[in-house]
Amino acid sequence: MILDDILKVLKTSKERAYTIDNNNYTYSELYKFVCNIYHFLLNENKENKPVIVYGHKEIYMKATFLACSFAGITYVPIDESMPKERIEQIVGQINPHLIIGGNISKEKIYEVMYADEFREIDKIYLEPNDIYYIIFTSGSTGIPKGVKVTYNNLNSCIYWLKEKINIKKGVILNQANFSFDLSVADLYLSAVSESEHFVINNLNLDFNKTFEQLKSSKANMLVATPSFVDLLLLDKSFGKELMPNLQIILFCGEKLLKSTIKKIYSRFDNIKIVNSYGPTECTFAVASIEVDNNILNNDEIPVGIPKEDVQIFIVDENLNQLQEKQIGEILITGESVADGYLGNVNNNSFIQYNGKKAYLTGDLGFIRNGMLYYKARKDKQIKYKGYRIELSDIEQNLQQLNYIDKAVVIAKKGKEDKVLNIIAFLILKEKIIKTEKEISEDLKTKMPEYMCPRIKIVKEFPINNNGKCDEKKLLEEY
Ligand code: AMP
């Protein structure tokens, strides 16, 4: 299993393992860090509670993820960009004994990592059905929900990607924060392939710095969302000269547009573009496809061929299977389906189907010639700048501001349904005087910045024939 392979790499490799901000660490250094944290955790986390790992891509984060895994402890990554209130909601659900980067300060964990005393990892404690990590994602109730991913889930995903994309030793570039499941691919593909994991430190969203990092990375592979690459493509210098070694871009997380693919092909020759599809609840991805010229000439870009150990069905509202080419909800069964949500999240998504654990995605799509196509969402979940957001999560957070009477949050969409921005239309309680800017500031204390909508205060909502708020009209008036 992957942890056996990773342990072998850690013990034997002389290569570079991790780079952030011009600091790099070899596999033997990483191994020492992992060993020291592993023994620390086995001592300090006797009740075997999940451990929260808080920070922004520092080396201790990756070292702690690995140490937890070897020690049989579930970890929960939280990025520093998350606001305090949201972090508290996660901490409240996990109730951890240890927060690395929190009650175990960064200084303390570095002290542990660099301690002179060094004992090897003598046993891998994690069992195949144990929870490997819990990643929190936007929840429609206004509180993030934790997805429990098992060792089996992750193992199956990483070996599938490694083989499918034919990953060789090289440099794998990371875009996403470790609290998003997109990062799982680069975190573990790098480790199993003895590659250098080069992370982009983009906490301050400094574009010039991002480009410097792209150049110095000498990366062979990039794991990214289409939104991120679209942003890079806005700059003419994003191309072969900047990244001469780039051979593979692995996309996941949102619709990959033809325009993005064509631009990439025009800037890089001999590049392999892989589209992959899947929700966090099914461990990074469950289908993938290399987008070559043949695929590009299709009327639509598919999201891929399902991996061998999952089965994907297109179903109607009563869960009856639909025919080829018919559009319905995408239902996933098999090895990738996670263990469910943490706690008592009220959900109808993790279900039993034909006697097997299944996940009902909320995505609409169809299958043609064994290939899966994504069409749209059934509900109010969106992808904005690559981030997964439940619009009702934003509404719930707005409703918690005691001066707001009513809130409606709408995603304004452009070509190919791409979300251009999110707008919150608000009616304030009587006699309240607040500016849109002040409301934005209040909201930023509750939700990550990428979730914060534009604010528009209105006197009333237009009503449609059903007596509901007429969202179309609201947008038009806006
Ligand atoms: P996340 O849990 O953040 O990975 O988001 C999962 C959701 O992103 C899926 O349910 C889809 O709605 C969307 N998604 C993921 N991959 C793709 C893709 N390749 N094309 C279109 N939508 C995608």
Image (cartoon, grey):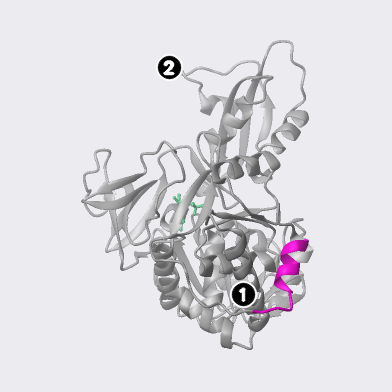
Task: For residue 260, say whether it is visible.
Answer: no
- Which residue type carries mark 2? Asn
Q: Give the residue at mark 2.
A: 465
Q: Is residue 108 magenta?
A: yes
Circle nearer the N terminus (2, 1): 1
- The CA distance from mark 2 to mark 1 is 65 Å
436 up-or-down from 27: above or below: above
Relative horizontal placement of residue 110, taking residue 292 as reference (left or right): right
- Which residue type carries mark 1? Cys
Magenta-tinted stretch: 107-118
Q: Give the residue at mark 1.
A: 35
Task: For residue 411, say whether it is visible.
Answer: yes
Name the residue: 65% across, 16% down.
459
Can you say which quadrant of the picture contains the C terminus? top right
112 up-or-down from 406: above or below: below
Q: Secondary structure at mark 2?
A: loop
Q: Is residue 368 magenta?
A: no
Disc nearest the viewer among 2 and 1: 1
Relative horizontal placement of residue 432, taking residue 149 as reference (left or right): right
Q: Nearer the viewer, residue 420 or 275?
A: 275
Residue 425: image location, x then y, percent: 62, 26
Relative horizontal placement of residue 478, taking residue 165 as reference (left or right): right
47 up-or-down from 377: above or below: below
Relative horizontal placement of residue 471, taking residue 242 as reference (left or right): left
Q: Could you say which quadrant of the image residue 444 lies in?
A: top right
What is the number of callouts on the image? 2
